[in-house]
Image (tube, helix red, strand yellow):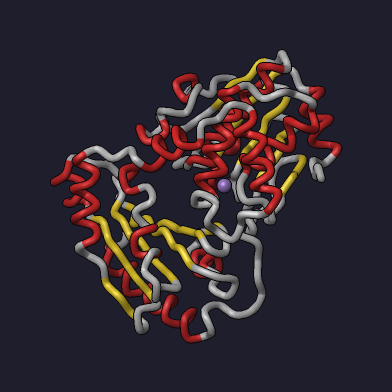
Amino acid sequence: MNTVPEDIALAVEKGRSFLLATHIYPDGDALGSLLALGDILKVMGKDVFLYTEEPVSHLYEFLPGSDGLGERLGDVARFDCAIALDCGDRFRLGRRADRILTVKPTLMIDHHAGHKLFGDLQWVEPGRSSTGEMVFELSRRLGVGLSRDAAFCLYAAIVSDTGSFKYSCTSPRTMRIAADLLDAGVDPAEVAGKLFDNFTLNRLRLLKRVLETLEMHADGGIAIILATRAMFADTGTRGADTENFINYPRSLATVRVAAFLKETDESLVSVSLRSKGEHCNVARIAALFGGGGHRNAAGFKCPNISLEEVRVGLLVRLRELMATGCGGDEAQGR
Ligand SMILES: [Mn+2]
C-alpha cells in the first residue's frame, strides 16, 4: 500500500534543482534518509544539494555519500524545490530554517507524532517507523530502482529508528521494506557492525563514567544518567559520542522511563527521554520543556541552566508521569 501523496510525488517529478535538509544533530534516520533521497534524485537526473549545518558525526561517516554534504547553503534562489526530512518542526531545521523555507515549494517528509506543520506540501505519517521507510515508498512511487548505496542508507535509517526492529513502531510493512532492501544487496551484519560496534576506547571510557551516575527512582520505574563537561574533557570525547547511551538505563527490566542529561558545548543541557509501552508518553514531557519527539523517544534542550536544576525539575515531571499510570491512555504513534 503506497501512501505517497499525489502532490508530493508530482512536485518531486517536476523539480529540477533540489535542496535537501534534515534536522540538526542528525541521527541515523535523518542522515540515511537524506543521503538515500539525494541518490534517488540524482538517478532521476536532477541537481541535488544536501545541506547540513554541521559536519557529519564520525559515527555516521560510514554512510555512503556522507562526505558530499555541504555546510554552505549559498544563494537558495538556484533551487526550485526543497525537501525537509525527518524534521518535526521548523526550529529543528537549524539556524538557516528561514532561508531554506523561502524555496518554493518546500516539502515535508516526516514521521514525528507531534509534527508541527510547516513548509508548503506535507507528507507526515506518525505510523511509520522511520523517514527511511517513507523515502523507500517514494522511490517506489517514482519508479526509481535503488542503488546499493541508497538501499544501504535506507536500511541504516530503519535499523536506527526501530532500535534494530525492536521498538513497537516496527510494523509488518517495515519488515517487508527491510527485506526488499536486503534483496537490493544490503548486508545486515555490515550495517549493524558499523552502527553499533563502532566504539573508540575513549568513547567506552566515557560510557563507564556515565554509567557510574545511574540513579533510580519510583521503585525502579525511572532511571537517570548524566554526562558532564568534565567527563567529555577527561576522556577526550564529544556530545556525539553519547549516541545510544540512553539504551543502557532503558534496558533495565523495571524501567518505564529513562532519561539522559548531558552538558553540551554551547552551555545547554540536552535531555534524551525513552519510555516503554503505549501508556508512557515522553513526547508530552519533552513538550513541557519546549522539546518534542515521539511517544517512546523524545528530547529537549535547556539554555543557561545547571544540569542539577534540570535534573530536579525533570524528576518531578517523570514522577507525575509514573503516578498517572505512566502517561494516560491516549496512544500516539511513535
Ligand atoms: Mn526519524
* Image: 66 above or below 290: above
For image coordinates 17% across by 51% down, the residue present is 230
Question: From this viewpoint, is residue 303 visible?
Answer: no
- From the viewer's side, name the closer residue of 149 and 107: 149
Where does residue 51 sit, x and y in percent of width and height? 54, 28
- From the viewer's side, name the closer residue of 28 and 251: 251
Q: How many labels does the image show?
A: 0
In the figure, residue 180 lies in which quadrant? Answer: top right
Where does residue 83 sit, x and y in percent of width and height? 67, 33
* Image: 261 above or below 24: below
For image coordinates 71% across by 13% down, the residue present is 45
Pick the quarter of the image with the C terminus: bottom right
In the figure, residue 189 lies in which quadrant? Answer: top left
With 318 as the anchor, is 45 left or right in this view? right
Question: From this viewpoint, is residue 252 visible?
Answer: yes
Taking the view exactly as shown, the residue that stands out farthest to the top is: 45
Where does residue 31 sit, x and y in percent of width and height? 52, 35
For image coordinates 72% across by 27% down, the residue present is 81
Pick the quarter of the image with the N terminus: top right
* Image: 244 above or below 35: below
Taking the view exactly as shown, the residue that stands out farthest to the left is: 234
For image coordinates 60% across by 80% down, the residue present is 328
* Image: 241 above or below 83: below
- From the viewer's side, name the closer residue of 81 and 210: 210
With 205 as the anchor, is 71 left or right in this view? right
In the figure, residue 263 lies in which quadrant? Answer: bottom left
With 11 as the anchor, is 192 left or right in this view? left
Where does residue 244 sit, x and y in percent of width and height? 38, 51
